[in-house]
Amino acid sequence: MGQWQTKEQLTDLLCSLVEYPSITGSNAEIAIIEYLYYILEDRKYYQDHPEHLNLHPLDDGRQLLTALVKQGEAKDTIVLIAHADVVGVEDYGSWQNLAFYPKELTQELHKNPSVLPKDAAKDLLTGDWLFGRGIMDMKAGLTLHLSMLEKAMEGEFDGNLLLVAVPDEEVNSEGMLAALPALAEIKDKENLIYKTAINGEPMFSKYPGDPANYLYTGSIGKTLPGFFCYGKETHAGEPFAGLNANLMVSYIAQEMELNETFIEQVDGERTPPPISLMQRDLKHHYSVQTPQSAVAMYNVLYMKQTIEQLNEKLLLAAQRARAKIINHYHHQASFYLEGTQTSNFSPEIQILTYEQLYKEAVERYGTREVERRQNRLINQRDEGDRDFSTSLVQNLASLCKDISPMIVLFYSPPFYPSVSSQHDPLIQSGAKKAIETARNKFGVKLTEVEYFTGLSDLSFIGPVSMKSSIDHLLNQMPIQGKGYELPAKIMETITMPIINIGPRGRDAHQWTERLELTYSFDKLPEILTETIHHFFKS
């Protein structure tokens, strides 16, 4: 018997991983990858084959880990994908210090279950759920993959397993993007054939209280469109002599937030509607001058839509917002201006894409001057990708003040391609095997769903669902080629069938995040084992 096979062993391993507070960008995100290396390098297999266990640096100093278990001269290889980073813990409030100690946090919650929402309290009182940050998203999946890797070390499978554990999935997926060339190198060096990739992201509920169990044969796509609103500044004492960018962005919010026209339905599956992930004005200091510019960015998910179709919907939302902004301005002015009084300002609003704005700036100043200004921003950069994208748009807008007010549509990283292996015969047979094993051995109904809606690193290695080129997105992405590269060519070189079979949990990215232990660590290991056997035999 190995060290990571029983429910108790897996729970202890999981807790040891959760105790690393590996928030994306923190030092602990580096430390947990080193810990994985540490617990694997002592194993006899890696003592005998140290070349199969490696740390790979990212450009920013973080690391990802690859751990190959090779069976003789076998070529067929299953890639196990897992991320080791987690989101922050500010939402835990007074339990923040316990967020990374699942047993202690769960014990503390037992003292006063009434502090939890009703569904979380109900789970707590069963005694079969553990609470904690990252416990379901996705250190439980990583724990299960380590268990499968241990079985491979003991000769369980007829083919090879390759674990890829990455940082940064929760922000830009830079870990997975850096893993692509590493996968290509290992494939060539070891003469491997990648049959499929298995991810261990947890099940996501389709609605609050959803009792169903899912596996996924694809992963949903994500774009992050931004609306840059450039108004006309004025003194707060002369409100109708300008147009407040905060007013503009508020109407964008009304048109975008939870807008049903963005819900895409494919074979009974639906994408969640857009939701704002950032909205603010761009004033650096308080004054009685109204904000000249503001920005909002939205999480927009898709399955089979093209970028052109998304652009059309986004621009229509901007047009509706423009009409409401102008109507609001004139309606409110009618209450303030008396008699023959008029304002010498008229809030005509231009709607542009980033590509159109760039062309407008070039017409006024020439390519050389525009590039000089943007290169200066690049050399002085001290912002993250989303803020820097906004700065690049703001710089161009300031060169085109004569056409303001304006609303500019652009995109920021991250971008997740929509991918699917639903019609791949190998994946279909593997999904059927997993479903049959769950039903026949455990009486559990496991349902196949095409798209995992929580976003995953499978987006960068699976078969792309969207039929159009991503150039339509990259052309509207200010940061592309300016310190950020979406490596489209590398993504095309490493493509394989994909499936996601993960544990049962609830409330990812909430302070009530929790994992159910019996299905996850008693039943799922056998379901995974049988499915892997099936893939190697197929």
Image (cartoon, rainbow, N blue to C red):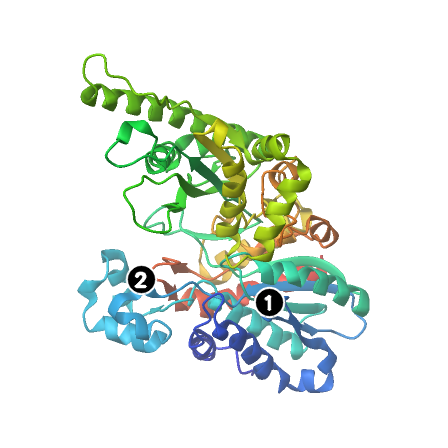
- Residue drawn at point x = 58 percent, y = 83 percent: 38
Where residue 49 appears, as percent x and y from the top left, is 73, 82
One can see residue 219 in this view:
yes
Disc 1 crowd, CA 10 A, few/some/many (<14, 14-19, 20+): few
- Residue drawn at point x = 26 percent, y = 66 percent: 93
Disc 2 crowd, CA 10 A, few/some/many (<14, 14-19, 20+): few
Amino acid type indicated by mark 1: Asp
Image position of 480 with respect to 11: above or below: above
Of residues 401 and 68, the one drawn nearer to the viewer in this rendering? 401
Of residues 211 and 386, the one drawn nearer to the viewer in this rendering? 386
Q: Which residue is mark 1?
A: 60
Where residue 480 appears, as percent x and y from the top left, is 62, 47
Task: Indicate left or right for 508 with 341 as reference.
Answer: right
Q: Quadrant of residue 185?
A: bottom right
Q: Secondary structure at mark 1?
A: loop
Separation (CA) of disc 1 from disc 2: 28 Å
Task: Indicate left or right for 98 with 503 as reference.
Answer: left
Amino acid type indicated by mark 2: Asp
Q: Which mark is residue 91?
A: 2
Where residue 398 appears, as percent x and y from the top left, is 50, 38
